[in-house]
């Protein structure tokens, strides 16, 4: 299976872009507008949609990964600068022993079994969040060589009470199981995938 990555550098002069940035549910709807309608009860899964909002030195950049060809023309005129590329060459080139740079914004969390939070999913931070990513990376087929973790602004909804804690993990790793890594790239990692979490970006180290 292949995937496409669409990079949207948002133009903050556009009112729709500014509105979307204030509401993660609006970002989700905008992302879903890139794939066809009529995909059934679970359209995000059917289209393999994952996304991440990167805050760069030149402004916010929305990365959208899909397993169906995206339709950027469905974005509002002037919403941002858009570029799409086929990820299949990268995914196919992943091999055991390859050193890679990685980046993922993840909802590091666990289900509590004791105390007032028993049965609830609670966010992790600091060393606990780093340990969470270490475990997830190992299960994904990555051996981490370097890890930098940075808390991100929580994903919030305006019309509905959404609040997802997000940690950005980035660094270097070595691929121990290329098949597992490919599966993780295509399906995402962890909770909160509808709210900008779970998209694993990889780049071979040179």
Image (tube, helix red, strand yellow):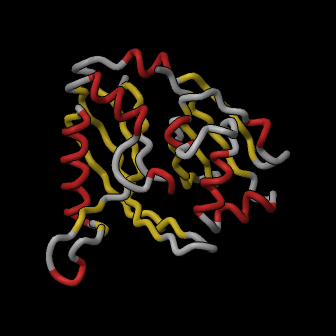
Nearest the eye: 43 or 24: 43
- What is the x, y in percent for residue 87? 51, 24
In the figure, 20 relative to 189: above or below?
below
- What is the x, y in percent for residue 192? 43, 56
In the figure, 131 relative to 143: above or below?
below
Nearest the eye: 46 or 132: 46
At horizontal 16% and vertical 82% (from top left) the residue drawn is 115
Which residue lies most toward the left here? 114
Q: Is residue 108 left or right of residue 187?
A: left
Q: Quadrant of the C terminus?
A: top left
Q: Is residue 32 left or right of residue 201?
A: right
At horizontal 81% and vertical 57% (from top left) the residue drawn is 14
In the figure, 88 relative to 118: above or below?
above
In the figure, 116 relative to 206: above or below?
below
At horizontal 49% and vertical 19% (from top left) the residue drawn is 88
Which residue lies most toward the front here? 40
At horizontal 57% and vertical 22% (from top left) the residue drawn is 86
Nearest the eye: 60 or 128: 128
Q: Is residue 163 left or right of residue 24?
A: left
- What is the x, y in percent for residue 39? 61, 38
Task: Determine if residue 83 is in view.
Answer: yes
Nearest the eye: 145 or 164: 164
- When asked about the image quadrant of residue 96, the answer is top left
Number of disc labels: 0
Which residue lies most toward the bottom here? 116
- When asked about the image quadrant of residue 40, the answer is top right
- What is the x, y in percent for residue 45? 49, 40
- When asked about the image quadrant of residue 178, the answer is top left
Task: Determine if residue 144 is in view.
Answer: no
């Amino acid at each position: 299976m292949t995937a496409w990555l669409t990079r949207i550098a948002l133009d903050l002069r556009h009112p729709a872009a500014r509105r979307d940035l204030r509401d993660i549910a609006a970002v989700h709807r905008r992302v879903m507008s890139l794939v066809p309608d009529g995909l059934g009860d679970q359209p995000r899964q059917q289209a393999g949609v994952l996304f991440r909002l990167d805050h760069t030195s030149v402004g916010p950049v929305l990365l959208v990964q899909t397993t169906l060809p995206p339709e950027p023309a469905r974005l509002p005129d002037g919403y941002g600068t858009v570029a799409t590329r086929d990820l299949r060459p990268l995914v196919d080139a992943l091999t055991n022993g390859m050193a890679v740079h990685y980046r993922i914004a993840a909802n590091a969390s666990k289900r509590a079994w004791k105390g007032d939070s028993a049965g609830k999913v609670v966010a992790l931070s600091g060393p606990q969040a780093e340990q969470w990513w270490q475990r997830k990376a190992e299960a994904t087929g990555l051996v981490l060589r370097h890890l930098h973790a940075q808390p991100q602004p929580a994903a919030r909804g305006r019309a509905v009470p959404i609040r997802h804690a997000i940690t950005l993990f980035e660094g270097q790793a070595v691929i121990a199981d290329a098949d597992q890594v490919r599966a993780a790239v295509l399906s995402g990692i962890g909770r909160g995938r509808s709210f900008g979490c779970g998209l694993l970006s990889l780049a071979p180290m040179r």
